[in-house]
Amino acid sequence: MPVPSRWFIRSSYICLFIGIVIGALMLVHKAYPLHPAIWVLLPVHIELLVIGWIVQFTMGTAYWILPRYLKGSSRGNTKLARSMVFLLNVGIVVVIADRFTDSSLPLAVIGRLLEVSAVALFVGMHWKRVVTYNK
């Protein structure tokens, strides 16, 4: 398994674990009220499980499974792949940080742009890998 896939999948499992813990806290809060501010964690829970776990796990698996190039490097530029992992994870952290800070900067917008740029980079890197087998 290539290194970028391993990093994608490892960080997706970290997001899954943290998301499960936050979800469990919210469920316990329904039965035994802990603190009224616990519901501030709901968007964090959603971000971690949707983008952090599902999208990241899918991207890591696809990077590994999609067809390799017929010539040259089998999966393309590894520096771009590592930057793809970095952009997505930094985007997740920035979006989560927006929930806990009262900054004048639009951190959520910046985080979403980082996430979208990681996905666009993923599509750009893999488009040719799929098209090479169409010929």
Image: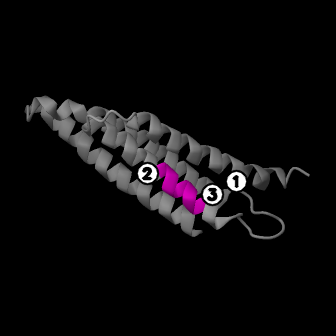
**Disc number lying in front (3 or 2):** 2
- At horizontal 64% and vertical 49% (from top left) the residue drawn is 121
CB-based contact (under 8 Å), mark 3 and mark 2: no
In this figure, which residue is indicated by the disc labeled 3? 63
Q: Earlier in the sequence, mark 1 or mark 2?
A: 2
Kind of residue sitting beneath label 2: Val
Query: Which comes sooner in the sequence, label 3 or label 1?
Result: 3
From the top left corner, tell me how far across and down residue 3 is, in percent: 55, 69
Q: CA distance from mark 3 to mark 1?
A: 9 Å
Dominant SS of magenta comes to helix
Instruction: Judge from the rendering whether residue 66 lies leftward or rightward of residue 119; answer left or right.
Output: right
Q: Amino acid at mark 1?
A: Met
Give the residue displayed 32% in from the left and 52% down from the top.
Answer: 17
Q: Any mark on residue 90, and which?
A: 2
Mark 3–mark 2 distance (CA, rounded to whole Å): 19 Å
Instruction: State the separation of the CA atoms marked 1 and 2.
Output: 19 Å
In percent of width and height, residue 58 lies at: 55, 49
Other residues around mark 2 within 10 Å, as few (<14) / some (14–19) / many (≥20) = some
User: How many other residues sit within 10 Å of disc 1, few (<14), some (14-19) or many (≥20)?
Assistant: some
> Where is residue 2 shown, x and y percent of the image?
59, 68
User: Of the residues tagged 3 and 1, which is closer to the observer?
Assistant: 1
Secondary structure, mark 3, is helix
* Residue 93 on the magenta span: no
Q: Magenta stretch?
A: 81-88
Residue picked out by circle 1:
125
